[in-house]
Amino acid sequence: MKILIVDDFSTMRRIIKNLLRDLGFTNADEADDGNTALPMLKSGKYDFLVTDWNMPGMSGLDLLKEVRADDNLKTLPVLMVTAEAKRDQIVAAAQAGVNGYVVKPFTAAVLKEKIEKIFERIQ
Amino acid sequence: MGSMSKHETDHQGLDAEVTDKLKAQATQLVDQLNAGDYAGAMTVINDLSEVRDQSLYKEVGRLTRSLHEAIRNFQIDPRNAEQSEALSKMTDASDRLEYVVQMTSKAANRTMDLVEDAMPRASAMRDEAAELRDEWQRLRRREMKPAEFRALHARIDTFFVSLNADASATYDNLSEILLAQDFQDLTGQVIQKVTALVKEVEEHLLSLVVMASHVDQITGTVHETPVDDREPESAEQGVGPQIKASEREDVVSGQDDVDDLLSSLGF
């Protein structure tokens, strides 16, 4: 299971990486925005994408749309972990095809639950 | 007479000294007009407009001084000795806020270093304790051969030694994590100073705007309102954390709200 974590703050990437490792996912790469992440996703055979929303360069929502528009990536599970908390935004993310939405600040338990739910639905 | 009524609207912004002068001169003007002394009246009108100009200059001068003061106050107070040297070098808000970002990031990384250092030790202790507990149960059930017992004996000895070392190392990590939280104090002070400065500058700017509108009123200047061509905050790009989320209808108040909303959408 190869995971890509996209967030512009290295601390948040590190927190998510640690939590994922606790959940048994040890193979995770990092990117700091959509523009960096997209080429990695296209060439890297990732199984799961965890992305922030508000980032300089390409936002997480745009990254999600790019992923869904790409024939090779469109089924990639995407979990959004973000401080964006407007109802409209959550609806927009859902319409863009997000698989899960975790609002910051979050707990390890919430992240675990959402990730497990995503994989349950896929299997 | 037009300028008279303007002065009345300015009344609140004027010194008592000025208003007293105005009142006295206005009375004098009326008296002179009633007495038919038009030349004297013209002189009083001149004096009046001079008072107006002077109070205007005075007000602008006062505002300029306080604005200047506000900008000067923004420099870090060098008497604050215990503030780090880095602080004293900073002269503007963005540097100060950048310092907050650095401090918080340093503290977060320091904490995570210590946690990552402690976690493998804690899990090794847990695993060894679990195995020893199982062995111990075997011993109590008398399922253990003498050679196995000797091995267990040695293992427990080793475990106690490493338990002591690991627990004290973990304790050290925890107390360093505690210390790493001092960033809240330092960054809190910086943010409070910046906030106070922003408020102060805001107040001074507001008085400048009020002052400028008075000047416009007196001189009869009309400005074209510039078109606001700033990009509106875009929900597409993201707007960051919501402040006072609980007071807003269009914002979720937490993960439960998100889950409810998503399940209402069929998730």
Image (cartoon, coloured by chain):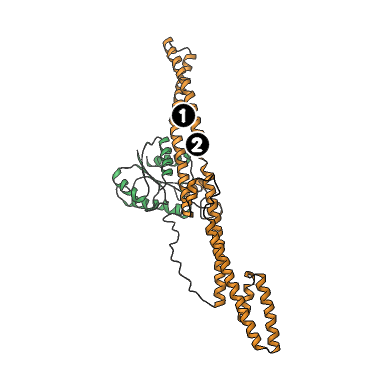
Relative height, residue A36 to residue B42 (above, below): above
Identify the residue at horizontal 48%, vertical 71% (top origin): B225
- Asked if labels 1 and 2 share a chain, the reply is yes
Identify the residue at horizontal 47%, vertical 14% (top origin): B139
> Which is nearer the eye, A81 or B46?
B46
The residue beneath circle 1 is B122
Amino acid type, residue under disc 2 in the picture = Ile
Amino acid type, residue under disc 1 in the picture = Ala
Please, what secondary structure does the residue beneath circle 1 have?
Answer: helix
Which residue reaches farthest top? B146
Which residue reaches farthest left? A43
The shade of chain B is orange
Q: Nearer the viewer, mark 1 or mark 2?
A: 2
Q: Quadrant of the N terminus of chain A?
A: top left
- Circle 1 crowding by C-alpha within 10 Å: few under 14, some 14–19, many from 20: some
- Chain letter of the residue carrying label 1: B
Identify the residue at horizontal 68%, vertical 88% (top origin): B37
Relative height, residue A93 to residue B40 (above, below): above
Q: Position of residue B122 (x, y in %)?
A: 46, 29
Residue B262 seen? no
Q: Position of residue B118 (x, y in %)?
A: 45, 31
Q: Position of residue A19 (x, y in %)?
A: 43, 38
- Tell whether B210 sits left or right of A76: right
The residue beneath circle 2 is B177
Please, what secondary structure does the residue beneath circle 2 have?
Answer: helix
The shade of chain A is green
Measure the alpha-carbon separation of dots 1 and 2.
16 Å
- Tell whether A65 sits left or right of B211: left
Relative height, residue A94 to residue A110 (above, below): below
